Image (cartoon, helix red, strand yellow):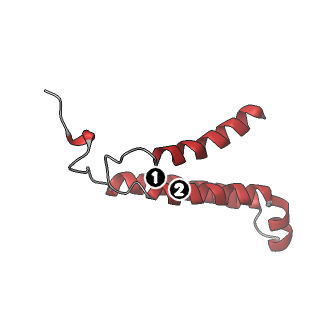
Amino acid sequence: MRLYAAVQAYSALVLLVALMFPAGYTRRWDLLVVLGFYVLAKIFELLDKPILSASHVMSGHTLKHLSAACAGYWILRMLEKRERLPWSNASKTKP
């Protein structure tokens, strides 16, 4: 369980740290949307049984997976729409 908790905590931490570094591409703030989906997934995980007892159709576990899938989609969307910033180190090519 410790490994699971570490992976969960460090995933969110990596997203926050990535926002602290200078951007080489546009759309870096999409990472906040990804973090939001991640937090929503954790909330669904914690409220698994209450959600199932209230809806009688879908559990929090199912909603957790849907939220995680939305986070994955948003990352792909960000990568597809981003553009290189002209002043970034990423735009400089080495000879």
User: How far across and how far down the image is residue 8, in percent?
Assistant: 66, 42
Location of residue 59 (image quadrant): bottom right
Which three-letter amino acid code belongs to the residue tagged 1? Answer: Ile
Which three-letter amino acid code belongs to the residue tagged 2? Answer: Val
Image-based side of 74 in relation to 67, left or right: left
Mark 1 or 2: in front is 2
Graded by Cα atoms within 10 Å as few (under 14), some (14 to 19) or many (20 or more), the crowding at tag 2 reads: many
User: Looking at the picture, does residue 71 appear above or below residue 91?
Assistant: below
For label 1, the residue is 75
Residue at image position (31%, 46%) is 24
1 or 2: tag closer to the N-terminus: 2
For label 2, the residue is 34
Where does the N terminus fall, quadrant-wise? Answer: top right
Marks 1 and 2 in Cβ contact (< 8 Å): yes
Residue at image position (65%, 55%) is 65
Q: Estimate the spatial distance between the alpha carbons at disc 1 and disc 2, rounded to whole Å.
A: 7 Å
Residue at image position (18%, 34%) is 93
Secondary structure beneath disc 2? helix
Q: Residue furthest left?
A: 95
Q: Which of 44 and 58 is in front in this view?
A: 44
Image-based side of 84 in relation to 94, left or right: right
User: How far across and how far down the image is residue 27, in percent?
Assistant: 37, 57
Residue at image position (69%, 61%) is 63
